[in-house]
Amino acid sequence: MAQDLQSYVNLIKKELPEKLLEINKIVKPKFEVCALAQKFEDKKEYPTLLFTNVENLRGEPNNKLVINLTFRDRLALALGLESSKLGMDFIFKLEKLFAHPIKPIVVSKANAPVRQVIKKGAEVDLESLPVTTHHEMDGGPYFTMMIVCKHPEWAGKAAGIHNVAFHRMEYKGKKELATLITPLHTLSVLKSYRERGLKCPIAVILGHHPLFLMGASARPPMDRSEYDIIGGLLREPLKLVESETLGDDFLVPAEAEIILEGEISTNEYVTEGPFGEWTGYIGAQCVGYKINVNCMYSRENPILVDHFVGHRETHELQGGSRELDLYHRLKEAGCEVKAVHLPSSGCAGFIAYVQIQKMVEGDQWNAAMAAATTGLPKLIVLVDEDVDIYDDSAVLSAVACISQPGIHTQIIRGLRGSILDPAMDHPTMHNLLVIDATKPIDHFFPVKAKIPQEILDRIKIRDYLE
Amino acid sequence: METRWIICIHCKKRFYVKNDLLFSKLPLHCPFCDLYFCVDTEKEMIKDRPTASEQGEDNQSGR
């Protein structure tokens, strides 16, 4: 399978041409790229936008950039599914591929397309890239891609494991970035280096095949690398190459578009933000970590991948692995779960819809408790199999007609939440509202009104229109 | 309060910062005019609650 971004773009052009738009006119990186994406979003359209003529930070045109890359219908094609298989078929495919991670292979430097153009030291110049400013009140231009770091050899069980994760990175200068590291695996790596007074070597991956992005958004255990997960998604080993400046045992993706190498200063802090986050709200300006960039390399004519953070693209990328995690927790708890969905209306995290088949009353509350352990939802709605959980209005209709506040609702207080939740009153804790919108099975409840199926099967609209 | 509104000393536009930054001795950075500036947290009237009129402005700013 081709592991590069351009091959994926060609696949979309061939199989879903209406979902890819190429824009060749000059576009400025400050607000204009995202404004175009927003205009489509306002019409509820979400094409992948491939820009061929974006200005860099010096105003020089002819730079390539792509946004809205990771929508589920397009990801389905890359996973070998039909583009219409977007519900539990998509989740079960992910489940199968995540269950079979594949260790990466290391290719020679000569066979790594990402090394076609290399700049080190004084030649490093982030200003030459089309770094976008997304939203009003963003602190500046931001990269929205991935940081690779490696657990050091004194890190116990995770020693030597490469960690890949999405982090926002604010442009601060030709060789400098600022980043916010939330308390997950990357922070754990940083702490390992900080304990010994060392800087943390990192690579920044500024674009790759979307399955690389999808694997990077997964949350494997600390002692498993996302590189293995990505190999599973690709159905073949991910191609890696030795880094240029971080040592031969620090491996970076050979088929990436652009890579920066440098270090995070573990005792040097800078002002970072504000930034429009995955929640759709502006995260406050805060204390961030400083990244010094010492080397940058890329393909000739690379495509910088940008993420429309806080918009539908974020939800579609993050939702897949989160829904799979949710599904697994419910199964492990012994629930008869039929389907799960984290809707875009809840930023693919804060709201969870769970479709279950109750055996006895009480099953629904056990399901809710299992769903709560995923750590993000502040609203869980439990519904029966006949409710379409991919339709917010269908779920709301079930809530309106089947549940009674105070009887079919529970609030659980003080669960660990996301620090980026704009509504958090506490630094780490949120509350959870559970709504049971399942019909009772131990006493009478009315039946939904419907036309007999045999009549619906027989009647065709075209037979009655002249 | 974990987060506070700040008024840029140059362009007078508002943005918000976390307390950890405000009390860290790092400069604040206006995202509108790109100015880095410091606030004297001893001298500034750091209120726990905005006044009614400030709250009204905050609401209009889209909080």
Image: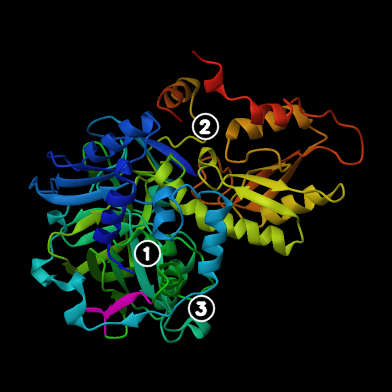
Label 3, secondary structure: give it.
Answer: loop
Q: Residue furthest top?
A: A466
Q: Is residue A138 left or right of residue A412?
A: left
Q: Within 10 Å of the Cα at label 1, are there few (<14), some (14-19), or many (20+) other Cα atoms?
A: many
The dot on residue A212 is: 1
Report the magenta residues as a range.
Answer: A237-247
Look at the magenta stretch and give its main secondary structure.
Answer: loop
Q: Residue at x 20, y 43 (%)?
A: A29
Counting from the top left corner in percent of width and height, residue A422 is at: 50, 41
Tag 1's secondary structure?
helix
Counting from the top left corner in percent of width and height, residue A304 is at 23, 55
Question: Three-letter amino acid code at disc 2?
Answer: Arg
Circles 1 and 2 on the same chain: no
Return the residue nearer the eye: B50 or A223.
Answer: A223
Residue beneath the point at 42% across and 64% down: A216
Q: Is-magenta flag for residue A367?
A: no
For disc 1, the chain is A
Residue placed at 26% from the left, 66% from the top? Answer: A256
Return the disc, 1 or 3, that comes first in the chain's sequence: 1
Q: What number is the disc on residue B49?
A: 2
Element type where label 2 sits in the image: loop
Whether discs 1 and 3 lie on one chain: the answer is yes
Marks 1 and 3 close (CB-CB < 8 Å) = no
